[in-house]
Amino acid sequence: MMRQAANVLAFASFALADVQPTAPDLGVPFSITQYWGAYSPYYNAANYTAPPDGCTINQVNLLQRHGARYPTSSDGKDFKASAEQLQSAKSFNGSQYDFLSNWSYQLGEDDLVPFGAAQSYDAGQTHYTRYASLVNSSNLPFLRASDSERVVETALNWSAGFAFASSGALSSPQLTVIIDQSTNDTLDDNMCPNAASSDDETDAWKDVFAPSIEDRINNDAPGASIGKSDVANLLQLCPFETVAFEQPSPWCNLFTQDDFEGLEYYLDIDDFYSTGYGNSLGPVQGVGWVNELIARLTDQPVQDATQTNSTLDSDPSTFPLGQSFYADFTHDHEMIAIYSAIGIFPQSGNLSTSEADPNRTWFISRLVPFSARMIVERMDCGGTANLRILVNDAVQPLAFCGSGNGQCTVTDFVQSQSFARSNGNGVWSQCS
Ligand SMILES: *[C@@H]1O[C@H](CO)[C@@H](O)[C@H](O)[C@H]1NC(C)=O
Ligand SMILES: *[C@@H]1O[C@H](CO)[C@@H](O)[C@H](O)[C@H]1NC(C)=O
Ligand SMILES: *[C@@H]1O[C@H](CO)[C@@H](O)[C@H](O)[C@H]1NC(C)=O
Ligand SMILES: *[C@@H]1O[C@H](CO)[C@@H](O)[C@H](O)[C@H]1NC(C)=O
Ligand SMILES: *[C@@H]1O[C@H](CO)[C@@H](O)[C@H](O)[C@H]1NC(C)=O
Ligand SMILES: *[C@@H]1O[C@H](CO)[C@@H](O)[C@H](O)[C@H]1NC(C)=O
Ligand SMILES: *[C@@H]1O[C@H](CO)[C@@H](O)[C@H](O)[C@H]1NC(C)=O
Ligand SMILES: *[C@@H]1O[C@H](CO)[C@@H](O)[C@H](O)[C@H]1NC(C)=O
Ligand SMILES: *[C@@H]1O[C@H](CO)[C@@H](O)[C@H](O)[C@H]1NC(C)=O
């Protein structure tokens, strides 16, 4: 008991400031980076608070998105084409366009950028500092990653940061399982080919927010004749160049805060209708991971008939039970599917594609920025097994399994997860 009491105090006294961040300051106002949706550099949605008095964390389940990356190869081609379209204008009215005379597309493809690696490393440091009492040299976190280079590199950077923060007490946790994305994979949304894309919804919103920006830029740049898709592409060059080159991209200066709010909602809608509540085959793509979580929380074998690989999950070397720290590395669309399968960030209906509600609770930069993290903390509260869920350090209310104060018993949580336990109420069979 003495030891537990001391741990509670230790948690309370740690501040993020105890960790030396390695990720550089990008020089862009936070107020703008928040509008970059899934391309926002990581920021915490709330300050971490220790669990209530009398509760001791005894298991951590971390689910983390890869850090900041280059555009995907297909997006990159589109961004480059839109930029060159604008560069082809006969003239430009405004010094904000001057950089275009000597600009060329210099971004890589798909992979983590150094800033993204640094934010992942910093997450490892933070998590060691916060959860040091749960690990020791013979009980290191158990790591899995989806087999995409940026996700694997994120896991390795997180692991290095975790070990570094222990000041030599621990070696880097091994990345034990890397799951092929062409197979059964609970860390990727690769197994539901029949799920609709979000194109209809993002196109509808583009028709609302892009025309005035299109007109303004075409007025400033006669001969460019950019279209609405070019507007969306050029806006995204601001975040991607900024995180890649670690300085404010000149593309950011072509746009106003209103323009970025339009982009933000575009990205919010994109994820909502891809694997979130707006897609009838979205949440079911998170079910496999939720069933793995239930197995870890309850020390019982995995029961699932969706995305899990029974070969991996029935083998203690690839799916051990009874661990105190699990860390899984994944992608944003899979995290959104998992949030929606669990029932966090509940929505009263579909997001409008004609109007952005400023009071909405679905802000992708708070849900899945680069290097986003969901943590399920299991704790012993005077003999009762409770849990709480933090998304980017914000404690989720969990009204579906408790009073909405941010805690549930593990039993009530498992009970509440009937969607996952029923393999998505039969919806999975529609995926392929
Ligand atoms: C965290 O706490 C600091 C210091 O009190 C405060 O300035 C900051 O706004 C808080 N961050 C969040 C996300 O609430
Ligand atoms: C250039 O832009 C300024 C400010 O938007 C505007 O007042 C001016 O009329 C424009 N000039 C031309 C030649 O379009
Ligand atoms: C043009 O860009 C190149 C490469 O980015 C840079 O080295 C050079 O200084 C730039 N020239 C001007 C006039 O800005
Ligand atoms: C390491 O942690 C495990 C699990 O909490 C515990 O059983 C073991 O005694 C610890 N080992 C050392 C050397 O502290
Ligand atoms: C961190 O990520 C970078 C960029 O992807 C990679 O080059 C580096 O090897 C990673 N660090 C570790 C410790 O694996
Ligand atoms: C399951 O995992 C094993 C071990 O990694 C692999 O060989 C097999 O192809 C996977 N099967 C499916 C259906 O994903
Ligand atoms: C939400 O939108 C999706 C995709 O358009 C649609 O399939 C679903 O029926 C909508 N749900 C509601 C409650 O309107
Ligand atoms: C892979 O997933 C499919 C679809 O849910 C399932 O039928 C199959 O049994 C799974 N394979 C393994 C090895 O778990
Ligand atoms: C947003 O919420 C505020 C405070 O509750 C309210 O005054 C405002 O009318 C709401 N805005 C919209 C567009 O619903």
Image: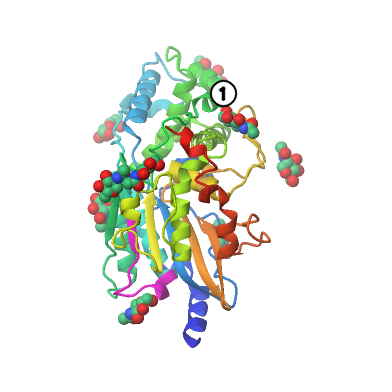
For ligand 9, give the image quadrant.
top right
Near mark 1 (Cα within 10 A), the count class, few <14, some 14-19 or many ≥20, is some
What range of the chain is rendered magenta?
131-144
Q: Is residue 215 above or below residue 274?
A: above
| Residue closest to the far bottom | 2
**Disc 1, ligand 7: is the CB inside 8 Å?**
no
Q: Nearer the viewer, residue 344 or 47?
A: 344
Residue 169, quarter of picture: bottom left
Q: Which residue is located at x 60 percent, y 61 percent?
A: 412
Expressed as whole percent of the image width and height from the top left, the position of residue 80 reads: 34, 26
Q: The residue tagged with tag 1: helix, strand or loop?
A: helix
Q: Residue at x 29, y 55 (%)?
A: 177
* 156, above or below 350, in the image: below
Locate residue 417 relative to residue 368 in the image: left or right.
Answer: right
Q: Is 35 colored magenta in this rendering?
A: no
Amino acid type, callout 1: Ala
Frontmost residue, 17 versus 335: 335
| Horizontal and vertical percent position of residue 233 | 43, 27
Q: Residue at x 52, y 27 (%)?
A: 202
Considering depth in this image, is 193 or 390 the residue closer to the camera?
193
Q: Which residue position holds label 1?
A: 204
Q: Is residue 286 left or right of residue 118?
A: right
Residue 414 x, y percent position in the rendering:
55, 59
Q: How are the residues colored?
A: rainbow
Q: Is residue 147 visible?
A: no
Nearer to the camera, 194 or 187 = 194
Name the image quarter holding the C terminus. top left
Q: How many marks?
A: 1
